[in-house]
Amino acid sequence: METNKVADGASLVRRVLVDLVEAVLNYDRLRDSITKIDELKRRLNERVARERRISEDVDAVLHSYEKDEKIETFKIYGEAISSFVKSTLEEYEKKLTELLDNEVMSVNREIEGYRSSSIRSVEAFLSRDPISLLEAEISTRYIEGGYETRYKCKCPKNLEYDFLLDSSEVEILKTRLSSGTLSKGLKLPARIGKTWVSKDPVIDFEKLDDYYLASASLSGTNLFATFTNEGTNSRFKFHSTVSEDASFLEIVYEDNLQNVVITSQPALNSNIEREAVSNMLGPIRLALLFLREHKLRLIRIFLGEVDVIAEMKIPDLVYTILEILSPQLQEETNRIVNDKRDPNQGQDKLVTREFLLERLALLGDRARNVSAFFGL
């Protein structure tokens, strides 16, 4: 199991009370705004229906007058009055619809703002790696002239999330990275051939200077890297594991004709310049580790099969995170609420009892459920 740096209790409680509470509050504002739009649309339908009844009522009055008075010439004037009323009411209906549509557009902008703020609050919380991870992977790939790097995290309770990382923070990933930049002149055995003058195998070497880093991923101590030669459509795949007491290296060569596990064939394996390969892979490993701390934005959150961002399941996400962190939160909360010092002496603390209760109170009906995760 991979573990990452877990925040100390006080700062963790504060981030929950600030970031996650804000995420829920903005979600609630979003829901209120959606309800407001539904109300606006209902009002529009009611007003249009009422406005159309005016025309019907006028027609009824005109028809009644014509029937009672029995004046034949009134029919022409009655039709003119009816036509004028309908035309005027149509203009009014158009104006009314425009006004309410503008209100709906304004509320939709509010919804997008609340949606963005809610997700950004979750992003701010997760960006500090507050949860011990079951698995984590940092991967990069060369696409459209640059390297796209992602940090994929798997947590307890089927929680998974991905961050996009800022590849430009690493010099070697600002442009397409060739093998020659890392280890110039490196050659690797790629295949075994024979000549008519000797029965001994002949090793064919590939010069890696013509290969560039197409993709790489780091999970725990396992680094996977693929270098590609566009001209020959061939590639070298590396799997390197480095720990304090052991190291492992596997190299595979692929082209349109063959797939060779170089490290599994003694004749090829004995011709590998392992130190040069290590010099080439080492900077990639360090670059990926470094980029973990340079997050750009949260691009994916899933609870099981549920896409939290697409479906805006923010309360479900927050409850899941609180359930995971509950033991840590309860331990720190117990210390906070049992602090007997004068509140004025605790201004330097990250979280005071008053701050804790004030933030929880903002959650309204949810406060009781959320407080349980803090042991209150």
Image (spheres, grey):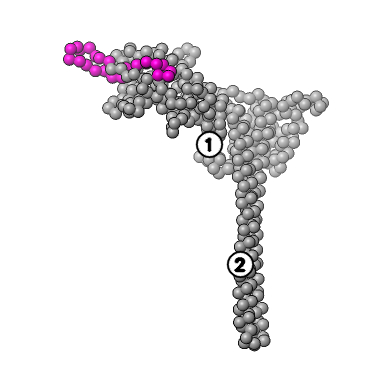
Q: Residue furthest left?
A: 196
Q: On the rendered image, what quadrant is the C terminus found in?
A: top right
Main SS of residues in magenta: strand
Question: Horizontal placement of 205 versus 249: left or right?
Answer: left
The Cα–Cα distance between marks 1 and 2, rounded to whole angstroms, is 47 Å
Q: How many numbered marks have been drawn onto this rendered protein structure?
A: 2
Question: Horizontal placement of 190 versus 164: left or right?
Answer: left
Mark 2, other Cα within 10 Å: few <14 / some 14–19 / many ≥20: some
| Local SS, label 2 | helix
Residue at image x 59%, y 30%?
127
Residue placed under numbered mark 2 in the picture: 90
Q: Is residue 329 visible?
A: no
Q: What segment is highlighted magenta in the picture?
A: 180-203
Please name the amino acid that badge 1 sits on: Arg
| Local SS, label 1 | strand
Answer whether residue 24 is magenta in the image: no
Q: Which comes sooner in the sequence, label 1 or label 2?
A: 2
Question: Horizontal placement of 57 versus 199: left or right?
Answer: right
- From the viewer's perspective, is residue 98 above or below residue 109? below
Residue placed under numbered mark 1 in the picture: 300
Please name the amino acid that badge 2 sits on: Glu
